[in-house]
Amino acid sequence: MSVTYCADTQTFYLDGKDVTYAFCLTAGYPEHLYFGKKIPHDSLLHMRTGGAAEGTIPFGSTGRNMHTIPSELTNYGRGDYREPAILVENPSGDRISELLYEGHEILSEKPKISGMPSMDGGETLVLRLKDKLTGFQADLYYTAYDDSNVIARRAVYRNGTNGKAILRRAYSFSMGLPGNGYRMLSLHGAWCRERRMEIIPLHHGVVSIDSKRLSSSAALNPFMGILSEHADENQGEVYGVSLVYSSSYVLKAEGTSGGDTLLTGGINDFDFHWDLAPGEEFETPEVVLAFSDCGLGGMSRAFHDAYRNHLINKQYVKKPRPLVLNNWEGTHFNFTLDKLKAIIDGAAGTGIDTFVLDDGWFGYSRDNEKSSMGDWHIVNPQKLPGGFAPLVEHIHSKGMKFGLWFEPEMIGPNSDLLKNHPDYAITIDGREPCLGRCQMMMDLTRKDVRDYIVETVNRVIRENNISYVKWDFNRNATETYSRGRAPERQAEFAHRYALGLYDLCERIVEANPQVFFEGCSAGGARFDPAMLHYFSQIWTSDNTDADDRTCIQYGTSMVYPLSAMSCHVSHSPNITTKRPISYKTRSDIAHLGATGYELDASDWTDEDRARTAEEIKEYKSCQDLILEGDLYRLDNPMTSNYFSFLVVAKDQSRAILTTYRRQLQAGGEPKRIRLLGLDPQKNYRVRELDLVASGSTLMNVGLVTRFPSPLGDYQTLKFHLDVE
Ligand code: GLA
């Protein structure tokens, strides 16, 4: 039983793998009591600190100071001045709500959110709240998991009033944390430097991260880590907040005057409102809350388990992934059929099993980003005379599968698509549209636009024996406006775009279960849990430089499992950074994810092919660890000269350790590494060191690795550990 209600104390307990989440009803108001390490169901009422008097604050009908009660859903207008989770304009025009307990239900199965991706799950608590005066309602959903340390939450708002209600804000949750003095981790970035870590102290007042781009964005991932005072990578209490959403969002942490910390957020209420007719509901995206008492590492493993077991496509999540060669960095737009055949010939026989043709294959003149965007119905006649057939035949003759790049959400100024359907683009009449990468976005809020995309893309997939699709999204939104929607409903646009996108994914991704889908957004600019639900892996960054990748992959792993990150071996010197890095290092770093190749293999010699075949064999021998293992981050490349990832099998029988040294330091420098996550009682053989030691010794004493000096900068060492 993961949900328990104790009627005596009016307390709800949710028990996950090693965590308990508890809240009680205080005069009908859901008051947060605890989220932390698993505890028995003792009464926690003695912990209620909320409600203390504060000079200027008026009391509501509960007879308590609402402003200081750690709340499961903060309201506005009844003496709570913290960030409200809900702000609704009632038919009378007032914006007051007081959502109090009406009842609850325990469902045996977690219901899906209609039109939005969410985790699956078992026993689920639905807490029904209602404003007794207006009739407005909120249902709060809670699910705990016996295989991961997370709680999934969301809210459904229902207009139970007798007139129109307008949601001005409709967040997914709020949760009070005891005390203050926390620090907040965010993952910020930009093109080619996604998900860098930043940790700042929280203060009294609100700290928020958000997106206003209609995309979860590379600027700030929809994630917030809350670290208690002494927490770090491997110790201390950490909370994680991860939003399953891909459009404009906000997450907030507020140090309150009552001395506590309030977390809240969901759909960004900047430029948002939503009309609800009587009886209508509004579903919010899911938020996944993690707890760890062993630092950020434990928080990450909680998210990895939760997303692998309950969010990402079950058909693919733990299966060996297609091992692709993508031609983008090898050719960009500049290819011919012969060139592609030569690349495929170069890769044949190495273990690469899928050739992915990137941008440039469609329209009459897609020779750069200025033309043809959206013309998926035309295979470029200059580059691929005769259409795909000769290419696909060649790919198949080499025992490989065919993958193709699309950017289904976009429309270009020089395209047949825009000529035929000028109204499909997101634009405002009379206003020159802002172009991003020479293109505009399609109005996915409209069903006819989505129908057109679904039909066109599905036809190309169906008719060309396609096994793999890379779905790109290369710009953020401007002129957010939909023709045909009433003026007073235009601020629904950002969320309606998300709903349109998910509908598109369902009708393309889910309608083609035989096709493996990879997500992409100018690299990793839409790397979020909702996209991961549809795309089992996402292109992590356009920056394939192995040194930069150590930072990007380290930051991404805070929330997302290794198997979610597409990581390709590319040319040296790197096309973006011009940094030369050895083949071994490039492949060792790229093998810490869903690996592949992103280069021109047409000039590969037999020696190159043999080396690649060897690397792929090695990758495949450890792939189960990448797909299912527990990740321990041992060295942080953002704060040290090293990067070390240790991946341990769930049964602790095997592990791989990859260590990277950025710069050689003259005089040599042995590197001591203490391992984590092993079975202390068992003996492990470290293959490369010819060493046998107990897990206990390897974790407490560690091992010493030596990078041979002549190797110079940017080097990796890899160690395989097997239980004896
Ligand atoms: C984006 C992607 C790249 C590539 C190009 C093609 O930048 O991130 O991997 O597909 O588009 O235009």
Image (spheres, rainbow, N blue to C red):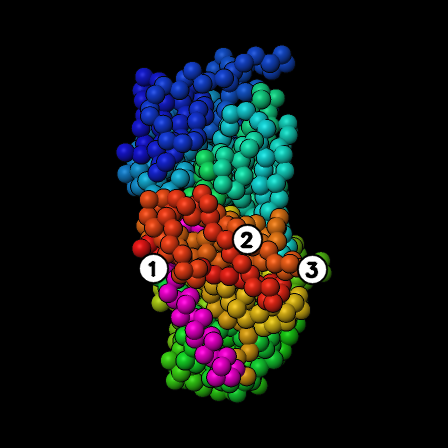
Callout 1 crowding tier (Cα within 10 Å): few <14, some 14–19, many ≥20: few
Give the structural element (helix, strand or loop) at label 2.
strand
Q: Nearer the viewer, residue 292 or 403?
A: 292
Give the structural element (helix, strand or loop) at label 3.
loop
**Mark 3 sits on what residue?**
434
**Mark 2 sits on what residue?**
671
Quarter of the figure with residue 107: top left
Query: Which labelled disc corresponds to residue 463?
Result: none
Q: Is residue 141 magenta?
A: no
Disc nearer the start of the sequence (3/2): 3
Alpha-carbon span between mark 2 and mark 1 = 41 Å
Alpha-carbon span between mark 3 and mark 2 = 51 Å
Q: Which stretch is magenta?
A: 604-632
Disc nearer the start of the sequence (2/1): 1
Query: Which labelled disc corresponds to residue 315?
Result: 1
Q: Which SS does the magenta portion mostly show? A: helix
Give the structural element (helix, strand or loop) at label 1.
loop
Q: Is residue 625 magenta?
A: yes
